[in-house]
Image (spheres, helix red, strand yellow):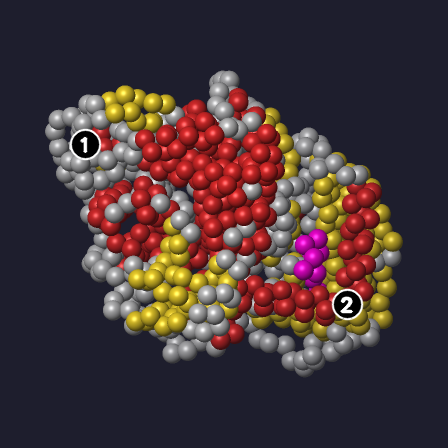
Amino acid sequence: MTMTSVPTPTRDAPSLSIADATRQATPEGELWRVTERGVARQAPGVAETIFALGNGYLGWRGNHAEGDTAVGEHGTFINGFHETFPIRHAEQAYGFAEVGQTIINAPDGKVLRVSVDGDPLSLDLSDVRQYERELDMRDGVMRRRLVWVTPNGKGVQIDLERLVSFDDKHLAVTTIGVTLINDDAEVTIDSRIVNRQDAEALPSETQNPAGGFDPRKSERLGERVLRPQEQWQEGLRSALSYRTARSGMTIAVVADHIIDTDNDHWLTNEVSTDAAATTIHVYARAGVKVRVTKLVSYHTASAVPTRELIDRCCGTLDIALRKGVPALFAAQRLWLDGFWARSDVQIGGQERLQQAVRWCLFQLAQASARADGLGIPAKGVTGSGYSGHYFWDTEIYVLPFLTYTTPLWARNALRMRYLMLPAARKRAAQLNELGALFPWRTINGEESSAYYPAGTAQYHINADICFALAQYVRASGDVDFLYREGVDIAVETARLWSTLGFWREGTDGSSFHIHGVTGPDEYTTVVNDNLFTNVMARFNLRFAAQTVRAMLEELPAQYQRAADRLSLDLDEVVAWERAADAIHIPYDAKVGIHPQDDVFLEREVWLLDETPPEQRPLLLHFHPLVIYRYQVLKQADVVLALFLQGDQFTDAEKLADFEYYDPLTTGDSTLSAVVQAILASEVGYQDLALEYFERSVFVDLADLHHNASDGVHVASAGGVWTALVAGFGGMRDHRGELSFDPRLPVGWEHLSFPLSYRGRQLRVTITADELTLENHGGALDITVRDVTYTVPTDGPLTIPLEHQGPVRPGRPAVHRATHVGNAPDGHPGIASATPIVTPAVVGQSTYVPVGDESVVENR
């Protein structure tokens, strides 16, 4: 494209374009894109996250190609590629985690710097007259277009495209086009691979340190991590390779280039241990474009020699070059066409929400699609937040989406847990238990959380993993996986509960208790009989017993192999069933709710409406011991149990529990609002449900927790899907029985979503008056509001709806009831609702943890 005039300067403030609710209609294409107009100068680290690209294995943050100093971080992340370090405890004790793990910033292949007549383009300093950047979620491509006027008045149009391939997880591609608008000039395009992890290649480009205490960020290692191995250049191809200093992992990155121009040009090359530069020098004529395509391949391994990894990278690039660049972009679109056909949730008449929902779903693909047996980090591959660790986020918040849209990805994620069993068995033995104890946070299978009250004590992760396994098997019908590998997870997690718990004799008979654990709420730690833990452990024990008995009946030979492998007999199964039937589920008849644990109601109530905004989140302003003494929740705990095990509670119990706990929940965790939205919908707080949903869907796009610069909140994105399908769509799948009880928000024309269920491809569409199911597969029985229907094959079934559930105005108020005397178990009753006394210095952190940021898991 040739331009003859230079645009005049614009003073428009940079903005992130979300669909405009004030317009009558937004073009359909905009609902598939997020657009930035104007160079972001405030919170650019957030833009680096929003425009990040990844495929579950490889991630490129949305840094600009010019390689200017990143306010967030220059990020290239590879799932599972990590370094280890010794955890130094202020006071050591037996069984504390000893070796930490943190994701490594892999060599950066994004850099493509442009200079004109010796003047470099810098988005921080240069005269940029036009600028637009978009993330196209249908094509899976980030595009950027700008017009720059050099100091000597020459206009330059620069067009950039970037993709991280879903089709080949080891490949990323970026293209840059440079066109002189009004005059000829000498142009250089400097393409680099840079080791930013060790900050030796270009000292001026080190990351800006984040100010203040924030335990949600990753560790910074104070020594060299990537030890150089082989590096070379041949023509347009460059290679760097490294071995990590402690973990011994290896990595190779190789870049190749395609130059397309009718201008005269030549090359210079330079390579060192921490950088490889290929510089294209062009005498550019006005209107004659210079186009450079850079193909970059990454391969990593636990211990494979870097020479072999370089060969693998070269093989990846050779295949890509044979296919041709247009074919690579076409393959990306074709892959995403399939993804959206399986995954897109459509919201009628809500364009702003529609666009944001699609961004969340796209992040789930970027975090999990090509994880291929690795875990799904809390930030995916979009940032270093939480050090690239895997948590229970995967099983509870991300796997439901995978299970009901692309079951293969869910199976891959569950296999990661199966492969971690040896380390989990070792950890259980270290804590004097049988079976396996999965780590609270990890990359390589070893526990990496040094703050045990909010880490190791969250034993519920065992049951969460088993729950996800059961949900996957029942929804997919993949009994083969269950009987070959999944049974080992079910058995070993059940064994832990059988030894962690104990029996107590009482006037009503024997009961089974679990003490000294932490539930999902990290503002209440190391308690006895946490309701969530006990309810999920009961499910775990029963599912393990059912699985073993089904194997014995259906495949006795396979059962015997598993029994021999696991040293299992049926007496142990009977013990699980007995413990499950007798497990203690806390309930207080006087208050009429399920206490979060056996002493929760004895604590004072923290009145959140009397806590000033500058002291939120609480974890950054109050010592944990202060928080632990009060009834205050970081995230939904009992409420999450009401959802996951909804068939174990009555409607009245759900309403009472929700109304009690909702006013005590701070929203300090991004894991909470999605669950609150689901239960609010179910019990009738429809407006509140929508408020919680909107808070979740914009958690990163609007940076609501002020830490989106550390990477996408992947679990929250997964929860957005669950809030839509299970909350507003009313879907439940208890005991393998698919049912619906919709709660369509007022003002939504319709809600429509696809589901993969036992080999059928369903589409569910809900309006105010009816629910329609389309079925591509065998006939299927489903339940809608307690009535069973058969969905025919290849034909729609439409069911009239008389209403959208109960409607309760407003939101629950703090439960201020006070009762005196003793509860049935002899403990005193609830304390009066007394406001907390806040520290004299408002807004200043009063707590700095030693050794590990896992004092909070603020995801």
Residue type marked 2: Gly
Q: How crowded is mark 2: few (under 14 residues within 10 Å), some or many (20 or more)?
A: few
Q: Mark 2 points at which residue?
A: 324
Measured as percent of width and height from the top left, residue 758 is found at: 50, 57
Identify the residue at the far left of this view: 820
Q: Identify the residue position indicated by label 1 in the image.
A: 830
Q: In which quarter of the image is the N terminus?
A: bottom right
- 771 over 844 or under it: above or below: below
Amino acid on which disc 1 is placed: Ile
| x then y, percent, for residue 743 | 31, 62
Q: Position of residue 25 (x, y in %)?
A: 41, 78
Estimate how packed mark 1 is, as few (under 14), some (14 to 19) or many (20 or more) residues with alpha carbons within 10 Å: many
The numbered mark, 2 or 1, whose residue comes first in the sequence reads 2
At x 29%, y 34%, the residue is: 585
Q: Is mark 1 on a helix, strand or loop?
A: loop
The front one of 744 and 253 is 744
Q: Quadrant of residue 561?
A: top right
- Residue lying at 23% horizontally and 45% vertically, measured from the top left: 653
Q: Do the residues labelled 2 and 1 touch (CB within 8 Å)?
A: no
Vertical relation: 375 (above or below) 518: below
Residue 841 seen by the camera: no
Range of residues picked out in magenta: 167-175
Q: Residue at x 67, y 69 (%)?
A: 330
